[in-house]
Image (spheres, rainbow, N blue to C red):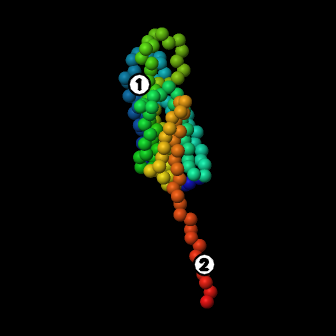
């Protein structure tokens, strides 16, 4: 596994964004609203093969137009939103166990990733992001001839 330089300010910035989001939601929430809206994170699996690092995120019920995947400063950003079904009124719900609203996940990328060839596909509610490794040049052995 590649060594990634730790940047404490990145974590602090992400924490600040989450706190701002929580406070914005708390102040803008209607009284009596009991649908589960708020900060949520889709679960992910991250694994690697010989050629790539692969991230799989569970995003059931989220339309492709509501998913954003981009790379910023060596960080993969996964952002999106799960929206309520507008056809069903809030008072008609008996139970709500799924989270709704916006989400964001960030992942630090190792330097060995070829950012130009990253691909993302979505099938059956699972987003798969393939991060291929760069073709690293192997050291060349030079034979020394004795005269």
Q: Residue placed at 38% from the left, 28% from the top?
A: 24
Q: Residue placed at 49% from the left, 54% from the top?
A: 111
Q: Nearer the viewer, residue 54 or 26?
A: 54
Identify the residue under disc 1. Answer: 26
Real-space Cα separation, disc 1 to disc 2, in angstroms: 69 Å
Give the image quarter of residue 32.
Answer: top left
| SS at mark 1 in the image | helix
Residue 49 location (% of width, % of height): 60, 49
Rate crowding at label 2 as few (under 14), some (14 to 19) or many (20 or more) other CA atoms within 10 Å: few
Image quarter of the C terminus: bottom right
Q: Nearer the viewer, residue 14 or 41?
A: 41
Give the image quarter of residue 15.
Answer: top left
- Indicate which label's residue lies in the foreground, 1 or 2: 2
| SS at mark 2 in the image | loop
Residue 70 location (% of width, % of height): 43, 42
Q: Residue placed at 52% from the left, 58% from the top?
A: 135
């Amino acid at each position: 596994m590649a060594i990634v330089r730790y940047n404490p300010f990145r974590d602090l910035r992400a924490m600040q964004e989450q706190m701002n989001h929580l406070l914005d939601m708390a102040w803008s929430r209607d009284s009596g609203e009991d649908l589960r809206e708020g900060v949520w994170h889709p679960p992910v699996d991250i694994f690697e093969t010989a050629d790539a690092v692969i991230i799989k995120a569970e995003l059931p019920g989220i339309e492709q137009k509501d998913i954003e995947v981009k790379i910023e400063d060596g960080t993969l950003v996964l952002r999106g939103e799960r929206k309520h079904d507008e056809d069903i009124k809030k008072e008609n719900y008996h139970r709500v166990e799924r989270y709704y609203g916006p989400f964001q996940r960030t992942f630090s990328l190792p330097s060995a990733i070829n950012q130009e060839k990253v691909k993302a596909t979505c099938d059956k509610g699972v987003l798969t992001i393939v991060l291929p490794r760069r073709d690293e040049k192997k050291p060349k052995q030079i034979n020394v001839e004795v005269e």
